[in-house]
Amino acid sequence: MPLALYDTWSRAIRPFTPLQTSHVGLYCCGPTVYDHAHIGNLRTYVFEDVLRRVLALNGYEVRHVVNITDVGHLASDADEGEDKMEKGSRRTGESAWEVAARYTAAFKGDWHALNLLEPTVWCRATDHIAEQIAFIAAIEQAAFMYITSDGVYFDTSRQDNYGFLARLDREGLQGGKRVALGDKRHVTDFALWKFSPRDAKRQMEWDSPWGRGFPGWHIECSAMSARYLGPWFDIHCGGEDHIAVHHSNEIAQTQAAHGTRLANFWMHGHFLMLDQDRMSKSGGGFLRLQTLIERGIDPLAYRYLCLTAHYRSKLRFSWDALDGAQVALDRLRRVYAEWLRDEDVSPGLTANGAADERYLARFSAEVDQDLNLPRALAVLWELVRSDLPAAVKRATVDRFDTVLGLRPAHQRDAASEIPAEVAALAERRRSARIAKQWAQADHLRDALAALGWRVEDDPKGQRIVPMEEQRDSQ
């Protein structure tokens, strides 16, 4: 089956054909680097990494561009409130530039820990102010903007199809608005350039034909994607929260300046859910990848967990589900190591065993149908249980892993692994606590201590650490 992908613009799965033979332009909205990324953010980047790998599996050369938002993202989608970089500066006591550098480095650390392929281009908003000013000038020439006391705004009333990506009810939004518009003409109009406040000095500001200030959040992606991929390219990705505002506004700007909707396919990853709500920084609490690592979880176990749900369905996070993903990943690595040992003793087999074409075809058919990774994982485990020779299974898994990115040949540090006996006792203790069998839970805690392991309880569950690690941390 040919590669087919879901396009948010058409609300349908469509056969994918690149605009240029064998070359694909892929733009992915990156982080706003005023704080750490949380694992909900990272789920979207795992989906986009898989997309890139599947495009490569189909023989395409991918030019992958990821932006870094280090200016202009205000606290409110209505272009109100404080710039998030200035907010991060006030919180940390560092300059906005130092905040951007620190959290960009942290984000790239998470990126590499999850085995995400390096983009062709990383591009920072502050490095592309000239491109953004030129883009706004093109919008001005097309008469799609107006100037107010606090900035330059895009006039959405000039486009009959504004908001089509999100199927926005523009009349309903206008009739039901509950916020003061200020000098804006319409509730859906958005800032292209914001003027610096007269009573305060910003750390990040530039001169422009319209006044000293800084770019709006949306203009940066339109300008940088056009700079590196052209104003009409193959695929634009992001999280589902980008559909109604950020991506709708990117499209509006590019239609005004270049007459295109920017990308032929618009693809969006869905939320990671924690309890009843999506994970977000604004909620005041979120889980970082480092939090998982500190609890003894391999970052690639989180990647595995992301692969167990389709990118267009919400994924509910739980510690039990994450533990299950870790168990599955460890099992895959264990059997892979066993296959390598078997190859050394099996007559007629070598470490260069040929991959099984039937399994490869089945795997490719699943990932080519809008990245159906849950079904692709089912093919993987069917292969693991098969009677094929070890060398063939290993070679086939190696081919699968060009998409999965789980590194089955990698073995975790034995010192960081929890023995099966200890894990079983800890699970019994967790069950006893849930059942409020406190005496039994205490007895099991003592049994773990006798084996040299300590259990630490917190609202998120229990963490098992060696006694030596506990002493070292004190």
Image (cartoon, helix red, strand yellow):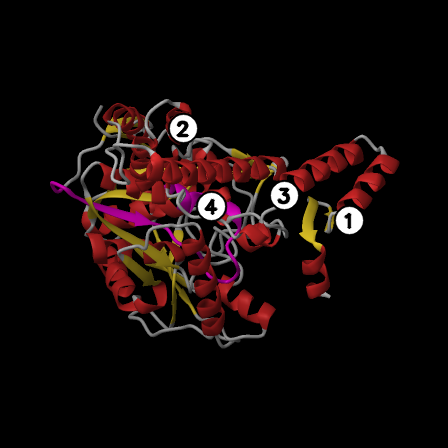
Task: Please rate how many residues cluster around mark 3, counting C-alpha atoms within 10 Å: few if below 14, some from 14 to 19, many from 20.
Answer: few
Extreme residue toward the right, this view: 439
Which label belongs to residue 384?
2
Residue 312 appears at what percent x and percent y? 42, 32
User: Quick one: label 3 or label 1, which is nearer the N terminus?
Assistant: 3
Which residue is drawn at the image coordinates 25% and 32% (left, top)?
A: 348
Given residues 470 and 263, the one toward you in this image is 470
Q: Name the residue rendered at 23%, 26% in the picture.
A: 357
Mark 1 or mark 4, which is nearer the start of the sequence? 4
Is the residue marked by circle 1 packed among few (<14), some (14-19), or many (20+) residues within 10 Å? some
Q: Residue furthest left?
A: 21
Which residues, given as a range, are shown in magenta?
A: 20-47
Q: Which residue is mark 3?
A: 419
Residue 102's disc number: none
* Distance between the alpha carbons at the discs numbered 4 and 1: 29 Å
Above or below residue 205? Residue 311 is above
Q: CA distance from mark 2 to mark 3?
A: 23 Å
Q: Secondary structure at mark 3?
A: loop
Q: Is residue 10 left or right of residue 83?
A: left
**Amino acid type, callout 2:** Val
**Does residue 80 show up magenta in the picture?**
no
Q: Tell me which label, 4 or 2, sits earlier in the chain.
A: 4
Amino acid, disc 4: Leu
- Examine the rendered structure and indicate whether residue 108 appears above or below residue 25: below
Q: Amino acid at mark 3?
A: Pro
